[in-house]
């Protein structure tokens, strides 16, 4: 007999493995495989729980059977807590995604701030505008994701603009 809490956890992980975002799917599939390996009877228990012939009284609290029978509607004046919590979860997820995006962009910008810009004259009289990218910094930049690289490139372009402004006397 498999613990009901473990079956519920497995079902949540399996749902993410089937329909989550790409990163969630990969992680959930890895966790699902580990759970199935550690608990061989888990998959069968979960399939029995999800099957349409499962009697409603054997379902855990909060699960609705797929055969059309529904739990009693909430009492008058209690509100729809399920929707409230779903909206709260969506808001938190949106904020988390925004924070992750901002942190990624900040990391790329931070790395670009380590570029060393310089304006100088060559021996033959040419004006040289250089951005020095040390080897260790280059190795970090190679590992950036696309958003971080774009932030790095944008900051590098700003540095180049600053060097041109200092050379030419500012924008017109």
Image (tube, rainbow, N blue to C red):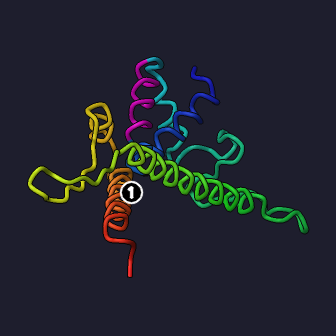
Taking the image as shown, residue 27 lies to the left or right of residue 142, namely: right
In the displayed orientation, state which residue is furthest to the right: 77
Q: From where the camera sits, is residue 14 visible?
A: yes
**Residue designated by label 1:** 155
- Closer to the camera in the image, 170 or 55: 170
Which x, y percent locates residue 60?
68, 40
Taking the image as shown, residue 170 lies to the left or right of residue 78, namely: left
Taking the image as shown, residue 70 lies to the left or right of residue 23, namely: right
Q: From where the camera sits, is residue 20 visible?
A: no
Which x, y percent locates residue 42?
49, 26
- In terms of secondary structure, what is the magenta stretch mainly? helix
Element type at mark 1: helix
Mark 1: give few (<14), some (14-19) or many (20+) Cα within 10 Å: some
In the displayed orientation, state which residue is furthest to the bottom: 172
Q: Residue drawn at (31%, 70%), measured in percent from left and top?
A: 168
Q: Is 77 drawn above or below residue 44 in the view shown?
A: below
Q: Is residue 30 magenta?
A: yes
In this picture, which residue range is highlighted in magenta? Answer: 26-37
Q: How many marks?
A: 1
- Closer to the camera in the image, 134 or 118: 118
Which x, y percent locates residue 40?
43, 20
Q: Residue drawn at (57%, 20%), measured in percent from left and top?
A: 1
Q: Quadrant of the C terminus?
A: bottom left
Taking the image as shown, residue 12 lies to the left or right of residue 116, namely: right
């Amino acid at each position: 007999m498999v613990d009901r809490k473990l079956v519920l956890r497995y079902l949540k992980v399996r749902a993410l493995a089937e329909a989550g975002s790409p990163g969630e799917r990969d992680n959930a599939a890895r966790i699902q495989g580990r759970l199935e390996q550690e608990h061989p009877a888990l998959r069968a228990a979960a399939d029995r729980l999800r099957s349409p012939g499962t009697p409603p009284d054997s379902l855990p609290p909060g699960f609705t059977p797929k055969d059309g029978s529904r739990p009693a509607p909430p009492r008058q004046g209690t509100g729809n807590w399920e929707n409230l919590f779903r909206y709260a979860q969506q808001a938190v997820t949106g904020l988390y995604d925004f924070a992750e995006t901002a942190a990624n962009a900040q990391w790329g910008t931070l790395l670009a701030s380590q570029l060393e810009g310089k304006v100088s004259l060559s021996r033959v009289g040419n004006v040289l505008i250089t951005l020095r990218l040390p080897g260790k910094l280059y190795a970090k930049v190679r590992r950036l994701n696309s958003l971080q690289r774009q932030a790095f490139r944008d900051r590098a372009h700003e540095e180049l603009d600053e060097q041109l402004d200092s050379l030419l006397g500012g924008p017109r």
